[in-house]
Image (tube, helix red, strand yellow):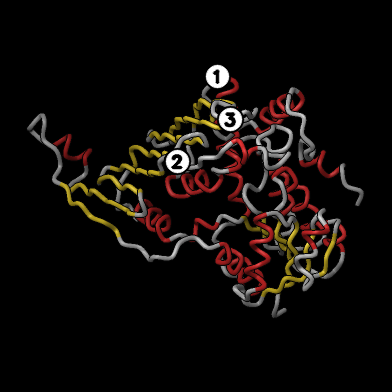
Amino acid sequence: MENIRLGIVGLGNMGKFHADYLLEGKVPRCSLAAVSDQSPASLDLFPQAKRYLDWSEMIRSGEIDAILIATPHFSHPTIGIAALEHGLHVLVEKPIAVQKADAERLIAASRAKPELTFAGMFQFRSDPRYQKLKSLVETGELGQLARTSWIVTDWYRTEAYYASGGWRATWRGEGGGVLLNQCPHNLDLWQWICGRPSKVRAFCQLGRYHDIEVEDSVTAFVEYPSGATGTFVTSTGEAPGTNRLEIVGERGKVVLEHGRIQFTRNETSMFEFSRSSKAGFAKPEVWNIEIPFPAHGAEHHVILQNFINAILDGEKLISPGADGLWSVELANAMLYSSLTGQTINLPLDAQAYEARLKELIASSTKEKKVVNSTAEDFAKSFNR
């Protein structure tokens, strides 16, 4: 095989974006062979490709080798599992699922087909800024981590935004708010760089800034197995907002903000200095360093090219699909902690969270036309 025939399901903003750069030739050895959407008008935008109103028909057509899933969140596992069962390679937009239980079902289906490539669209892993931060942590330049903090409140959204789609900001249609819609990339990067926490305690405010039933303001505290701690603060109601990632280790502090990486490096370990210094108010000497990185940022087509290369050449995936579980689990754990008023130990009890989400969906007060509540329910709504 020298070329991958790709099908895209879901022609909303992201699906159309992916289709456009494919047609521009940005991904060698990959062609847009088919598209699927429930809107004939959206399909008509791509006369170059085979067009399907029914995604399951496209999967069975024999016209594609791989699929890119860019539909509303609840449908990602259902379509992904069906595609894998029909022998297709799968690339899923973020998040890979709304809840951990569905993510695990999708991952299990991929593991049952080890000959197929399964990836997630976490394009910020290709961003030089985050790759540099990950390198600083992994190479031990920061030493043992002590604290992490990410304030990411520059996700400001208006009431008009939430009114733009019937599925938006409802338990039934989206399964959550800022954590599942805006923050999957942040949560993915946070655990990718700093490691996965072992405990979560969060405070999620439902509809604090908007007339919605899901969370639009979150403050979460985490603890790592090493004893390090972290905070994650996000909102869609703050303007102008902040985006500041701070990582503190025994060898200093690194801050990513305003497109710059600032490293205040301790000359000696702060732990070692504390034990050995005879002066009560002394501090380690520091070096102030601005760390350079390439100007180009995260690119969706880089992830798709990597996906194609993995299929054809066995190239290592930048964002394996199974890694998508961790951002989903963190989002679920934060919400579950807030709903129950408890600290949640990780790994999260997927079945307990699934049961709680179903309760939220059943008690929903929003009367919008939306997709069904779980991946299994979503599957039942289609005549295949």
Q: Which residue is mark 1?
A: 341
Q: Nearer the viewer, mark 1 or mark 3?
A: 3
| Residue 63 rendering spot, x and y as whole percentages | 82, 70
Q: Label 1 sits on what residue type?
A: Gly
Callout 3, which amino acid?
His
| Image point (42%, 58%), residue name | 131
Asked if disc 1 and disc 2 are in contact, CB closer than 8 Å, the reply is no
The alpha-carbon separation of the residues under discs 1 and 3 comes to: 23 Å
Q: Nearer the viewer, residue 224 or 61?
A: 61
The extreme top residue here reads: 341
Q: Which residue is mark 2?
A: 152
Residue 103 in the image: state x and y as whole percent. 68, 44
Where residue 58 sits, quadrant-wise, is bottom right
Dot placed on the residue nearer the N-terminal end, 2 or 3: 2
Disc 2 packing (10 Å; few <14; some 14–19; many ≥20): some
Find the residue positioned furthest to the front: 160
